[in-house]
Image (tube, helix red, strand yellow):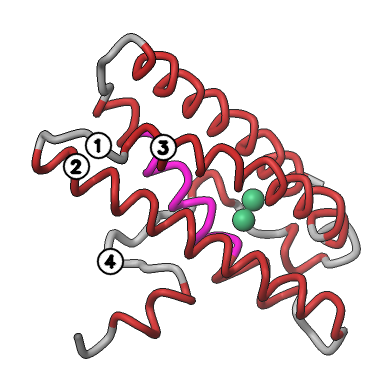
Amino acid sequence: MKNEKWLTDDHRIVNTKIQEVLDFMDKGFMDTDKFSDVERSLKKHIYFEETILFPALDRGDLRTHQMIEGLKMEHAALWKLMDVINKEIEEEKFVKSKKSLSEMFLILKTHNENEEGNIYNKIVENSDVDMVNIESLQFPGDFICEKLRNRRIGK
Ligand SMILES: [Fe+2]
Ligand SMILES: [Fe+2]
């Protein structure tokens, strides 16, 4: 139950941080530190889901497999939107950042509901996942989400 709660709490925390960046953008400013904070949290969350949680739960049931594939595609969409924002931060030219962040917020709304209603409840049935201490989990800086990783290699 510990991991399930951490993940659900993390959804709320990330959403709140995104909302704060959006509110700041409404005033015409980009809070790059807060955005980096969003990015760090979200990437670590995706890392845990794709490397530990999903492999432990994706074991033979077709419906679960298809759902996880869809969730991974949404991770890739979120990742690409963060890339767009990072590029604009680098160039200090903000054209698409607000739209991209709003899009992230929208994707996360259904993505998180889907995970909380259909995936995280399976953690309770799976003792392997519940033993992982994700609070102390280290995020490797070179990790790229699965659906983009395969495309990027060699380019
Ligand atoms: Fe996710
Ligand atoms: Fe999640």
**Range shown magenta:** 37-49
Q: Nearer the viewer, mark 4 or mark 2?
A: 2
Question: Disc 4, disc 3: CB below 8 Å?
Answer: no
The outermost residue toward the left is 91
Dot 1 lies on which element? loop
- Mark 1–mark 3 Cα distance, whole angstroms, equals 8 Å
Vertical order, 127 against 7 (above or below): below
The amino acid beneath tag 4 is Asp
Q: Earlier in the sequence, mark 4 or mark 1?
A: 1
The amino acid beneath tag 1 is Val
Q: Earlier in the sequence, mark 4 or mark 2?
A: 2
Dot 4 lies on which element? loop
Q: Nearer the viewer, mark 1 or mark 2?
A: 1
Coordinates of residue 34 in the picture (x, y in percent): 33, 26
**Which one is nearer the viewer's eye here, 139 or 25?**
25
- Residue with the mark numbered 1: 95
* Residue drawn where x is 84% and y is 67% of the image: 126
- Residue with the mark numbered 4: 142
Q: Residues within 10 Å of mark 4 (few under 14, many from 20)?
A: few
